[in-house]
Image (cartoon, rainbow, N blue to C red):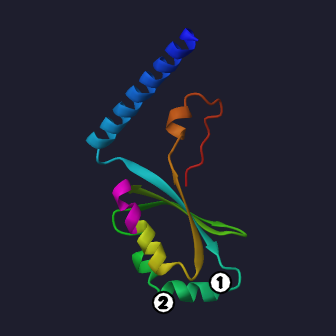
Amino acid sequence: MKNLLLLALLFLSCTAYSQSNAAKSGAENKDDKILLTIFLKHDQTMNVDEIEKIKVEQGFYENFPPEGTSVVNWFVVMGIGQMVVLELPASKLRAVNLALEKTAWKAFKTEFYPTYNLYPFIEGKIKNKSKVVY
């Protein structure tokens, strides 16, 4: 029981240390960016022309992506709609959400997934070094 308690205290101290360092480095580096994967799911009761008309009327192309964000990829996912990957500072997350609420909601249902690029961390570990670059 004593060993279990010591092990638990060691785990908690290591966890607290790693969290405090992560918080400190995040506060020190305001240029940290996140990736945001967005699914723009087509409303299948409308055809492409009807969806496009809504996007144009609501100013989708003028307002998305908002200033201060950049498009990493933009794919068509057949049977679902579109998948957009943005790179942005965390402070711009609200602007992305508002841009989509104001310009895409009648044409799409949206889903958001914060993501990060794991490849730089595992690149040296994997045997197949080939990577597709668009």
- Looking at this view, is 108 or 81 the one in front? 108
SS class of the residue under badge 2?
Answer: helix
Asked if 127 appears above or below 77 in the picture, the reply is above
The reply to whether residue 123 is visible in this rendering is: no
- Looking at this view, is 103 or 123 the one in front? 103
Discs 1/2, front: 2
Numbered range of the magenta stretch: 90-95
The residue that mark 1 highlights is: 48
Magenta region includes residue 88:
no
**Residue type of the residue flagged with mark 2:** Glu
The span from disc 1 to disc 2 (Cα, nearest Å) is 14 Å
Magenta span dominant secondary structure: helix
Q: Identify the residue at image location x=35%, y=31%.
A: 21
The residue that mark 2 highlights is: 57
Residue 128 image point, x, y percent? 65, 34
Asked if 106 appears above or below 109 in the picture, the reply is below
**Residue type of the residue flagged with mark 1:** Val
**Neighbourhood count class around disc 2 (C-alpha, 10 Å): few under 14, some 14–19, many 20 upward:** few
Asked if 8 appears above or below 134 in the picture, the reply is above
Q: Which quadrant, please, contains the N terminus?
A: top right
SS class of the residue under badge 1?
Answer: helix
Instruction: Say which label, 1 or 2, has the lower sequence index.
Output: 1
Marking on residue 108 = none
- Looking at this view, is 45 or 78 the one in front? 45
The reply to whether residue 103 is visible in this rendering is: yes
Residue 79 image point, x, y percent? 73, 70
Q: Residue furthest top?
A: 2
Q: Identify the residue at image location x=62%, y=31%.
A: 126
Q: How many marks?
A: 2
